[in-house]
Amino acid sequence: MVSAVIYSFDNFSIDTSRRVLLKGDESITLTPRIFDTLAHLVQHHDRVVTKEELLRSIWPNVFVEENNLTQSVSTLRRILGDRKGANRFIVTVAGHGYRFAAAVKVSGAPTQASESTTTIAVLPFKPLVEKDRDAALELGMADALIMQLSALQTIVRPLTSVRRFTSLDQDAQNAGRELGVESILDGSIQRASDRIRVSARLTNGADGKTLWTGTFDEKFTDVFTVQDAISERVASALKLRLNKGGLSKRFTDSTHAYELYVQGRYHWNRLVPSEVRKGIEFYEQALEIDPEYALALTGLAVANISLTISADGPPAELFPKAKTAALKALSIDESLADAHAYLAFVKFWFDWDWPGAESELKRALVLNPNSAEAHRGYGILLSQLRHFEEAIVRGERARQLDPLALITRANEAMFLYHAGRYEEAQQRLTSTLELEPNFWVALLALGKLYAQQKKYAEAVEALTKAKQFCGGSTQPLAMLGFVHGLAGDRVQAQSVLKELQALADARYVPPYNFSIVYYGLRDYKKTFTWLSRAYDARDPLLAAFINCEPFWQPLRSDKRFLSLLQRMNLFSEDYVGDRE
């Protein structure tokens, strides 16, 4: 037991021993720099703290620009709920520094060591012999158990992190070490005619000791009963607290609908546009059998969203489908955290309803504080709104919860890139590409990073590879045109425009992608023409990047750019004129 100093103000408190900010009973995640800035101001609430003092205290022995401090204070004001001009908590004293304005109560309190949380990975179940493989069923059993165990007092690695461990000779202990968990659940699964045989084993991640084993031989129609039994035995072995009714929830009574849903998840998880479309077909077939199958509706929502942002899917067609599916899923079961998160994606990429998106993400995190998807989505929203430090916190938490998910790692790198922290962004991207050298989203991000650093040859190399493995997205192609334009190679940039136009003659191509090529060519009139078309099309790439992408910074003083942001319910603080 450690004696801690508690600083209380308004409905907030700071526990200096645990380095945590609390709002009532809610813990608010802060980066170390942001926490240290707040703590220093609160601890010296009886006087004005100079900027020089804060810089020395928060960044000792490191040269940083004053803008870093300004951004930290701005982030703190937002976290504390200070409205512009109100300054209930942090007051700027012109020419001097800052003063913490709220009344502060100081008290000592015993702080218990933080309660440890059990972490567990459920590996894909495997057949006993290669010829009996049913990849969808193997992943489906793991996926179902992941969802059930997430209802316990534990952190369960999502399917996006464990799906790579499908080899028949996969060592469970090695997988557990890669995933950073204390316990591993794996096993075998066989299906013959109308029967299913499942053997499961729970082991300790540290020493490989078997904690529980069980074998189930049932009719396939009793697959849900098998899943319930395994989850209950795991909970008992790990002494986890069951949430009332948490394991007994059945999303469908139809094993046929369940089989189709499992097939949908399997194909969607392969993250290739053609496979995602197959996933949608299976989800739709599952819903024909059981229209109230909330998990299939949630899968349908995210599959349609993923096609718009990564496969040039027409937003006017796909986002309404995604929204309808997510809303229906929530009307059936409001407690589905991921359905709230995916509804948020629709709201910030298509509706441009930024407060509504934040509300959905907050609800998702109330329902499941360990939802990697909700933390990732929140990070994307915050980055789009230029709250970069907060986005980085969310991205880091998403990676901790889902450490081997490629898109989660790439998103975290993008948040760092948007914040201008290029070296850290490159480190994250390098580690992601070590896991999967051909992951096109990370290659695309690396190309953007190199372009921003004027390393045009390196950018072209990364983007060319991204184009090769993207599965049909025109984002890498457009970025190649942008980089060629920046590098002064107008012939290559014009060639990209011709290729984009040829594709657009046959199918939908996001207008945003034309805009960035013209921007690279410094043709600002056509840049804004295509940005306007992107606005009319509700192009999700426009919402995703226009406010946070560093290469747009030179245009943030242009009145046309300001007008675009305002029409999207965004705002630029940088307006001073326009650019011809």
Image: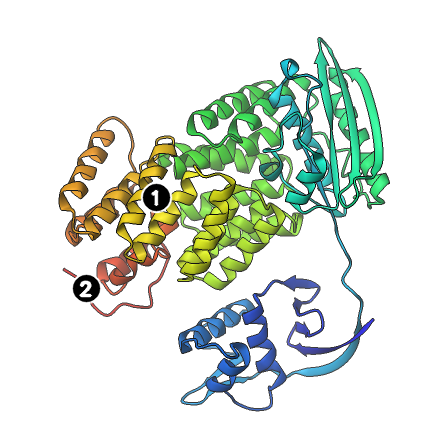
Q: Is residue 239 above or below residue 164?
A: below
**C-alpha distance separating marks 1 and 2:** 33 Å
Label 1 element class: helix
Indicate whether 67 appears above or below 429: below
471 left or right, relative to 166: left
- Give the number of the mark in front: 1 or 2: 1
Label annotation for residue 322: none
Q: Name the residue under label 2.
A: 578
**Residue 354 sits in quarter:** bottom left
- Identify the residue at image location x=85%, y=34%: 212
Drawn side of residue 106 relative to residue 388, left or right: right
Residue at horizontal 58 percent and vertical 35 percent from the top: 329
The x and y percentages for residue 527 are: 20, 50
Q: What residue type is labelled 2?
A: Asp
Q: In the image shown, does 140 or 360 lie closer to the viewer? A: 140
The amino acid on which the numbered mark 1 sits, given as a three-letter code, is Ala
Q: In which quarter of the image is the C terminus?
A: bottom left
Q: Is mark 2 on a helix, strand or loop?
A: loop
Using the rendered image of the protein, determine whether residue 489 is visible from the camera's viewpoint: yes
**Residue hosting label 1:** 462
Q: 130 or 159, which lies in front? A: 130
Q: Position of residue 294 (x, y in %)?
A: 61, 31
Quadrant showing the N terminus? bottom right
Q: Where is residue 453 in the image (x, y as percent from the top left)?
A: 31, 58
Q: In this view, does 419 lie to the left or right of 34?
A: left
